[in-house]
Amino acid sequence: MVGKHYRPPGKKKEGNAAKFVTRSQALKLLQISLPLFRKLCILKGVTPREPKKKFKGTHQTYYHVKDIAFLHHEPLLEVHRAIKTHERKIKKAEAKKNIERANRLRDQTPKPKIDRIIRQRYPRFVDALGELDDCLSMVHLFAALPASESKKIDVERVHKCRRLAHEWQAFISRTHKLRKAFVSVKGIYYQAAVEGQAITWLTPHSLQQVVSEEVDLPTMLNFLQLYEPLLGFVNFRLYHSINLKYPPLLDPRLEALAADLYALSRYVGRSTRPSAVNSESVDIVENEHVELKQSGAQSEDEKSELRLAQLHHQLPSNEHGPGALMHLVEEAAGDEEEEDQDTQECRKLFQNMKFFLSREVPRESLLFVIPAFGGVVSWEGEGGPFGESDQGITHQIVDREAQGHKFLSREYVQPQWIFDCVNARIILPTNDYGVGKIPPPHLSPFVDNEEEGAYVPDYAQTIKHLQAAARKEILPLPGVGKDLEDPQNLLAEGVIDRAEANEAAQRKQKIMMLEQQYHEDLKKELEHVTYTPMDSKVDEQVSTEVTKTGEESSYDVQNVDDMGKLLMSRKKRKLLEAMQISNDRKQAKHDLIKQRKKKIEAAQSQGS
């Protein structure tokens, strides 16, 4: 008789074999190639899974059955099949020497659209902002890469990435959303706060980038295919949130001079002023239109764009729909009340300061950072709003060993001074950042120096005192304000460590015994009692009691600690031991850093 749970072999699967499939099985189910499968997984956000029991071996990659069914109904599969069919038609036309038909078919090649995928993956705008870190890093990377046909990096794609990156930077800069900037060997890290989301991205240095053969470019291009429209949608939403037209209209003259970011900043900056009362912007557009007309080098499309820009500046700010330019973020009345405290603090950091960039400094990075914190900036070369001889310049950014000519009305500082001021949120002294000097260490704003047991550099302490002085606060002196009456409470609260608690307990007991002995001696003097050898024995007894009391206090501290461990569960006790081991490792690392610092200082003192 057949059992109740009898199952004929091959009829039905159960357990992990029914929930997961290997990658080769998924390729057979979808009937696609491995590169296309990887591309679909990247676009749809499908990742491999780790089943509890790997029924096909540990060397296989597993996917959930529902994820594969999700890919099976993807409309992009039909588009890619249509592209394959179209490519066969092109090859057939080329084989028949029908060049005209081949070119026509090449122009009619179907292109996959992933707008629906973006809306499916990011149903809310906050979700898209939360996933923007890798997107921005990838777009900024390809914006700095050289175009290469062999590596399938098109010129149009590089230009598009550069345009998207500059549009993002222009919005962040003009709305003062930038919070941190750190220059490292890999590149420059930025962090901005947009609608409550902290967005961190990495931009490469402005150097000639070399694409290594070890880099998997096809996979990166697949990610870029998702990130380009994603960043375009985000920029569209952000620009419309401040009532700006997207994509923005750029000044062709500045665009030709490779000053795209400055051109975008001018566009956003002008549009942020109320157009009904600001006639200067209209005059600027008219003057630029006259200059461009005299040069005679512009096409009809460029002239029509300029006329459109002029019409936008002439529109009343309260009579039109989403495309009109209304009261916006920066200079519009009443917007300062809507800004949070961080934005107001960042907007006023470099207020009433004019900067001039020498040709050797990283221009794009400083053009992004300085306006984000309220400064006015120009550069050496064509397209700058003002020249080096302008008397209103307060700071000139140089990065050379010696400066030939100097203006007494301005200060000459290195680029690191800008980034350190941004991270400290105060204007630091410029003495250590002068021309030819070795600047202080560039501290990372992403490291929390307030963490318990963390190593705090000396320059971080200096900046902390400068911040307190700027806010008119008084920092407590080291050791002042500690409650020595009850070191056990301080130990429990984490204010002091075990050694300090023992020392405080011993000090407290010793002071109490000395006070008691002093009062007894004073009492004897008042009673006119003479000093006898018995008193020396009493003194010895008091000293031994003080020593014993100190030992007992340290023993009591250790005893309390052991009793606390005994009352803990095994899980909590092991967790506490792991925390103590981690703290010991951190302390050993900090001690090693301090030893190295002492050796370097000793070597420098001997050398001098």
Image (spheres, rainbow, N blue to C red):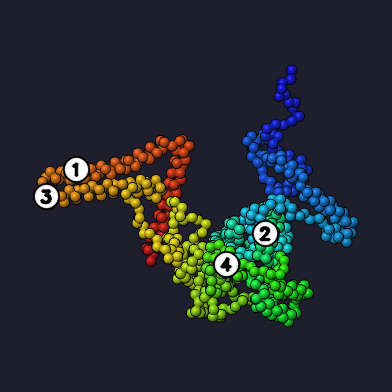
Residue 44 makes an appearance in the image: yes
**Residue, disc 2:** 234
The location of residue 407, given as percent across then percent down, is 51, 79
In the image, what residue type sits under mark 4?
Answer: Glu
- Element type at mark 2: helix
Residue 172 to residue 571: above or below: below
Are the residues at dot 3 and dot 4 in contact (C-beta closer than 8 Å)? no
Which class describes the residues within 10 Å of circle 2: few (<14), some (14-19), or many (20+)? Answer: some
Q: Nearer the viewer, mark 4 or mark 1?
A: 4
Q: Earlier in the sequence, mark 4 or mark 1?
A: 4
Which class describes the residues within 10 Å of circle 4: few (<14), some (14-19), or many (20+)? Answer: some
Q: Earlier in the sequence, mark 3 or mark 2?
A: 2
Marks 4/1: CA distance?
73 Å
Q: Nearer the viewer, residue 215 or 587?
A: 587
Marks 1/2: CA distance?
80 Å
Q: Can you tell which mark lies on residue 541?
A: 1
Q: Nearer the viewer, mark 3 or mark 2?
A: 3
Q: Is 590 left, or right, of 378 in this rendering? A: left
Residue 519 to residue 349: above or below: above
**Residue, disc 3:** 527
The location of residue 174, given as percent across then percent down, is 61, 67
Residue at the image point whose x is 50% and y is 77% from the top: 410
Q: Earlier in the sequence, mark 4 or mark 2?
A: 2
Are the residues at dot 4 and dot 1 in contact (C-beta closer than 8 Å)? no
- Element type at mark 1: helix
**Residue, disc 4:** 336
